[in-house]
Amino acid sequence: MKEREVLLSGRQLTKVFGYGPNKTTAISDVSFDFHEGEIVSIVGESGSGKTTLAKMLMGLLKQTSGTIEYKGKPRRLNRYADRRAYWKDIQAIFQDPFASFNLFHRVEKLLTDCIKLQGLQLSPEMQVRKMKEACSFVNLKYEELYNKYPFELSGGQMQRLMIARIFMLRPKVLIADEPTSMVDACSRSTILDMLLKLRDENKMTIIFITHDVGLAYYVSDTLLIMEKGRVVESGDAERIILNPQHSYTIQLINDVPKIHSAWNLG
Ligand SMILES: Nc1ncnc2c1ncn2[C@@H]1O[C@H](COP(=O)(O)OP(=O)(O)OP(=O)(O)O)[C@@H](O)[C@H]1O
Ligand SMILES: [Mg+2]
């Protein structure tokens, strides 16, 4: 990844929730560089701090200490215009798709909002064309869905709709927090392939969050292995899977029998 430009980086990030005896250190002294067009997976067990880190990267949670840099400059989100510009570039898909959408908006509005967010002035016909194109990218039929509310869709349809929005928004960075949690194995590989295609077509940086190191290996260039809020190992995905250095990484790999059988890793 060396030749690619560093897009997003964190230095000694720490996040502490609560005070006194109720204090939880969710992220502890975490540093990283994410490059343009890189797919990096953040891997760790439940409670290791993955979503907390994702929310800090999105600017939805403020770090207790440490700095985040975007395009080589300290990230500033104080002014509305700063946040708007940042969120044009950085988008997220969260674990629970139902929490990510306004439940009172129909699919059509959820998608036309993406066009507005981009500041595009398009005729109604062009808007429908764009929405149809985005839906067909994720194997959804716009005609069948545009009039529905989020609660009328299945979990898998919702997750694909989120990817359709990303297709329209074309952010520079996509943070995908367990984007396949609500789908079966077949749809899972379709969703992963869609993400890979988005990266290839748009040079998008994808930060993929999962507890499944096998899945992470399948999609990523690099891995960031997290245990209890700390990064225990990071770097080239293949190097880590073939030659893990940390006992926690070895344990994660041993917990995934399919890696061993599918890739004959012994
Ligand atoms: N708003 C909050 N207030 C207090 N503690 C929190 C808050 N959010 C997260 N935590 C704690 O921080 C730690 C990390 O949580 P986080 O949600 O980041 O884990 P995760 O790796 O995403 O887990 P999972 O795989 O289950 O989604 C946990 O101990 C959690 O209880
Ligand atoms: Mg999480």
Image (tube, rainbow, N blue to C red):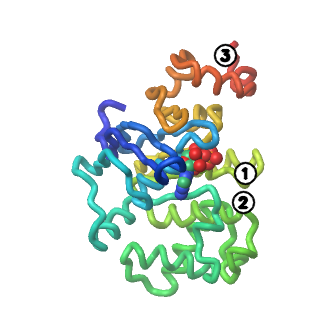
Label 1's element? helix
Indicate the amino acid at tag 2: Gly
Q: Label 1 amino acid? A: Ser
Residue 177 in view, yes or no: no
Instruction: Find residue 181 and report its horizontal and vertical position in percent.
Output: 69, 51
Residue at the (27%, 60%) spot, across then down:
76
Instruction: Please state if 93 lies on the left or on the right of 4 as rendered.
Output: right
For residue 104, which quarter of the picture?
Answer: bottom right
Quadrant (top left/top right/bottom left/bottom right) for the C terminus:
top right
**What residue sits 76% from the left and 66% below the top?**
154
Q: Disc 1 marks which residue?
A: 187
Q: Residues within 10 Å of mark 2 (few under 14, many from 20)?
A: some
Task: Identify which residue is drawn at 57% across, 38% down.
Answer: 219
What secondary structure is marked by label 2?
Answer: helix
Residue found at x 74% / y 71%? 153
Decide: is 172 above or below 239.
below
What residue would you read off at disc 2?
156
Q: Report if residue 60 is visible in the image.
A: yes
Where is residue 61? Give x, y as percent. 43, 58
Question: Within 10 Å of the Cα at label 3, are there few (<14), some (14-19), or many (20+) other Cα atoms?
Answer: few
Residue 114: % across, % down = 48, 73
